[in-house]
């Protein structure tokens, strides 16, 4: 199989599916290879036409759409106030939103929500996340169907169209075509490799993560400048960019007095994985292009997302969202609920005092909608801290234990060696008022939510692979050799 590389002709790393074929059948033997390819990009499938995933561009579907209306962008509510729900629904009508990463956990829920609200949505996704799962031998708890089936089902149920453009945003030719054909008025960018452990498996994944995320975002910035300069970029950052400083975390900026002079500067970033570092670099590139080219952008520094259901994904089994529980992609609360459901001890890393911001996935979609409805001004780089509550890992373990016991489950938590390099007991107080000021109505973590998440996990418990639960990626033992099975390393 051949594999494609960057459109700029430079050598790059791509996660490539290498299939060992026995009598025409694919085996489970897959590997990550660094590939060099200098052919023109966009003229071939991303992974050289792998039999597992085929990539093609459906940009032509979107041609000849109504021309972009500048009136629809940059509109704030009356007298510059945040837009109300009714105004938001009114302004949503027909507004074109490109959701990059729309086949993923946050992206799928958001694409459906925006479509329901009346936005005209195009999903752009390389489907590479499904490939990561195949390569690492992991799977979502929930049985998700193909993106094409998902979209068809949504069209049938809601009567709304969702466009699909399958391709890699690191391929600028593809992205340019997507922008020219769809003409987005806002771009919501979820399309990154988003797992810190994945980025710490081996050198190849570290390089891939930074290349995919930083170059992908850079291409989005150039595409906006070139084709849709009025377009509002809503970019998913992470609270992890800030680290855990021993002072309060502000929303993006901090005013500092130094040697008698004062300035308001970007809040210091102390990322703690190659993934988090890629997000920091994204933020710098976005801030720079807002200043240099007058782009408008909102960086949503999102906390850890939990939950699986939104009103739209609950409408049909084929609209179900993914729910990761494994040691590479699973996030804290979701993982604990699945562990409790299958009788696995809750895996608290180290002392469990690690405190972070969390939010319900129903609030992720709400926050993105609020950011779109109240766009940044030209030249403005806005930063919102997108979470609703803070919890330590021990707080979460206690809450899940209590909720599990109510359902008759025997739940216990154990401390496992911490695979990460991080403070296990620390000060944490992060501001998060800007989205509330725009009208966010939070879904706080409740017994009801835990109860429904646990029941959900119990429903699909026969799909759980117990071997994938323990953490298996060590920050200190990151290797140079490619590893196809993250569970092969014991901490
Ligand atoms: N899930 C969380 O708890 C969480 C927390 C904070 C921030 N975030 C951020 O939110 C975003 C979405 O996270 P998620 O949990 O939905 O991740 P996900 O892995 O479920 O989805 C990401 C999607 O982006 C696609 N993608 C990746 N690289 C691409 C590329 N080069 N071109 C086109 N598509 C590409 C993937 O195929 C996938 O469908 C990420 O940027 C992540 O950093 C997530």
Image (tube, helix red, strand yellow):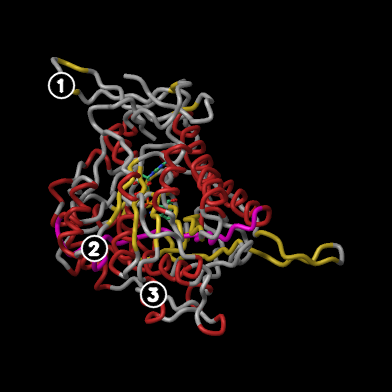
Dots 2, 3 in contact, CB < 8 A: no
Closer to us: 414 or 367? 367
The residue identified by callout 3 is 442
Closer to us: 336 or 193? 193
The residue that appears at 41% across and 80% down in the rendered structure is 87
The x, y position of residue 446, in whole percent, is: 30, 73
Numbered range of the magenta stretch:
293-317
Considering every residue shown, the one lying at the far bottom of the view is: 79
- Residue at mark 2 to residue at mark 3: CA–CA distance: 27 Å
Sequence-wise, the earlier of marks 1 and 2 is 1
- The circle drawn on residue 25 is 1
Disc 2: CA contacts within 10 A as few (<14), some (14-19) or many (>=20): some
The x, y position of residue 27, in whole percent, is: 19, 23
Sequence-wise, the earlier of marks 2 and 3 is 2
The residue identified by callout 2 is 160
Q: Nearer the viewer, mark 1 or mark 2?
A: 2
């Amino acid at each position: 199989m051949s594999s494609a590389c960057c459109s700029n002709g430079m050598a790059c790393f791509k996660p490539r599916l290498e299939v060992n074929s026995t009598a025409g059948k694919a085996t489970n033997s897959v590997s990550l290879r660094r590939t060099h390819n200098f052919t023109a990009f966009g003229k071939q499938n991303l992974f050289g036409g792998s039999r597992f995933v085929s990539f093609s561009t459906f940009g032509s579907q979107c041609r000849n759409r109504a021309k972009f209306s500048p009136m629809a962008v940059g509109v704030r509510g009356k007298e510059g106030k945040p837009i109300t729900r009714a105004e938001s629904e009114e302004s949503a009508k027909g507004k074109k939103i490109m959701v990059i990463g729309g086949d993923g956990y946050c992206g799928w829920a958001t694409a459906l929500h925006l479509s329901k609200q009346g936005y005209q949505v195009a999903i752009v996704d390389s489907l590479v996340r499904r490939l990561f799962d195949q390569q690492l031998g992991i799977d979502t708890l929930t049985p998700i169907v193909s993106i094409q089936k998902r979209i068809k089902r949504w069209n049938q149920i809601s009567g709304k169209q969702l466009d699909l453009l399958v391709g890699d945003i690191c391929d600028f030719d593809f992205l340019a075509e997507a922008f020219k054909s769809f003409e987005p008025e806002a771009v919501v960018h979820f399309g990154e490799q988003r797992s810190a452990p994945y980025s710490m498996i081996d050198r190849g994944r570290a390089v891939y993560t930074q290349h995919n995320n930083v170059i992908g975002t850079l291409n989005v910035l150039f595409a906006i400048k070139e084709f849709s300069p009025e377009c509002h970029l809503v970019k998913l950052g992470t609270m992890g960019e800030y680290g855990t400083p021993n002072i309060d975390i502000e929303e993006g900026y901090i005013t500092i007095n130094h040697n008698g002079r004062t300035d308001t500067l970007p809040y210091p970033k102390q990322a703690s994985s190659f993934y988090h570092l890629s997000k920091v670099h994204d933020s710098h590139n976005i801030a720079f292009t807002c200043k240099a080219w007058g782009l408008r952008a909102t960086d949503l520094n999102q906390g850890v997302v939990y939950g699986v259901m939104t009103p739209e994904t609950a409408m049909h089994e084929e609209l179900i969202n993914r729910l990761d529980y494994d040691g590479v992609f699973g996030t804290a609360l979701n993982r604990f609920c699945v562990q409790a459901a299958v009788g696995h001890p809750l895996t608290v890393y180290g002392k469990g005092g690690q405190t972070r911001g969390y939010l319900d996935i129903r609030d992720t979609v709400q926050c993105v909608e609020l950011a779109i409805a109240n766009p940044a001004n030209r030249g403005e780089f806005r930063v919102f801290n997108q979470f609703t509550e803070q919890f330590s890992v021990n707080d979460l373990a206690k809450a899940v234990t209590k909720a599990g016991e109510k359902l008759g489950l025997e739940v216990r938590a154990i401390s496992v060696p911490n695979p990460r390099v991080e403070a296990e007991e620390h000060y944490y107080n992060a501001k998060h008022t800007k989205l509330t000021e725009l009208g966010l109505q939070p879904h706080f973590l409740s017994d009801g939510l835990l109860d429904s998440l646990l029941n959900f996990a119990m429903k699909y418990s026969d799909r759980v692979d117990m071997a994938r639960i323990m953490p298996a990626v060590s920050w200190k033992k990151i290797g140079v050799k490619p590893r196809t099975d993250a569970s092969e390393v014991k901490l």
